[in-house]
């Protein structure tokens, strides 16, 4: 499987972030055509104590082709625009493929 | 599920990294008691083109308690020591819990 990964650093206002993420960003993102699964991980710390990161979101697609196609849709553009509006300064986006280890 | 996450930036020598990761680090890490699943994701890029990141590894445990217990074992210490030996300057460790989105 191929996945788009969004890794967020600690937001200044966690409550406002959580509220927007859950009630605005997630519903917009789930509308992206071809999205198979969306998995959210709350970062709770690190082996050394605190972490500079807050949230990891993994969005699965069938293939790189399917992801590329999805990225061109209006729904994906709306999701990307929304991310930039509330977390543009703390988010890192990556594209990855799961491999057998 | 609770997971330990290792996020690696691009190594200087990818071939040496891959070789050590597959043949040395993965076998050591898989011996950690309580480890339920290890999922490796190759980072292939980002929506903007290249990514500064290279690899994401997610290691699953039953609970925070199980993870804490695992981290105290000799096997986990050997895995941590090995990571530091070949990727200490490019790895970021996080602890997270998957949530329903």
Image: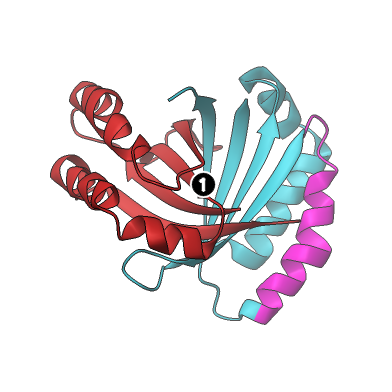
Chain colours: A red, B cyan
Residue lying at the far left of the rendered structure: A85
Instruction: Please name the residue that numbered disc 1 is placed on.
Output: A60
Question: Of residues A17 and B95, which is closer to you in this image?
Answer: A17
Q: Position of residue B1 (x, y in %)?
A: 62, 25
The residue depicted at 17 percent of the width and 39 percent of the height is: A86
Q: Position of residue B72 (x, y in %)?
A: 74, 31
Let me know if residue B51 is in the magenta part.
no
Q: Position of residue A83 (x, y in %)?
A: 23, 44
The residue depicted at 60 percent of the width and 81 percent of the height is: B13
Q: Is residue B89 visible?
A: no
**Chain assignment, label 1:** A
Left or right of A77: which side holds B52? right
Callout 1: SS: strand
The residue depicted at 34 percent of the width and 43 percent of the height is: A8
Task: Give the magenta range.
Answer: B15-35
Let me know if residue B17 is in the magenta part.
yes
Question: Of residues B33 and B80, which is closer to you in this image?
Answer: B33
User: Chief secondary structure of the magenta span?
Assistant: helix
Where does the C terminus of chain B fall, quadrant-wise?
top left
Q: Position of residue A24 (x, y in %)?
A: 22, 29
Vertical side of B71 occupied by A9: above or below: below
The residue depicted at 65 percent of the width and 20 percent of the height is: B63
Q: Is residue B74 visible?
A: yes
Question: Of residues A56 and A37, which is closer to you in this image?
Answer: A37
Quadrant of the image occupied by residue B56 = bottom right
Vertical side of B31 occupied by B55: above or below: below
């Amino acid at each position: 499987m191929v996945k788009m990964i969004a890794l967020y650093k600690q937001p200044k206002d966690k409550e406002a972030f959580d509220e927007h993420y859950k009630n605005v960003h997630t519903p917009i993102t789930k509308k992206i055509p071809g999205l198979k699964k969306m998995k959210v991980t709350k970062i709770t710390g690190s082996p050394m104590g605190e972490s500079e990161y807050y949230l990891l979101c993994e969005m699965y697609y069938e293939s790189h082709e399917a992801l590329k196609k999805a990225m061109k849709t209006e729904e994906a553009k709306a999701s990307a625009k929304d991310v930039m509006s509330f977390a543009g300064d703390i988010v890192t986006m990556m594209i990855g493929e799961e491999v057998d280890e």
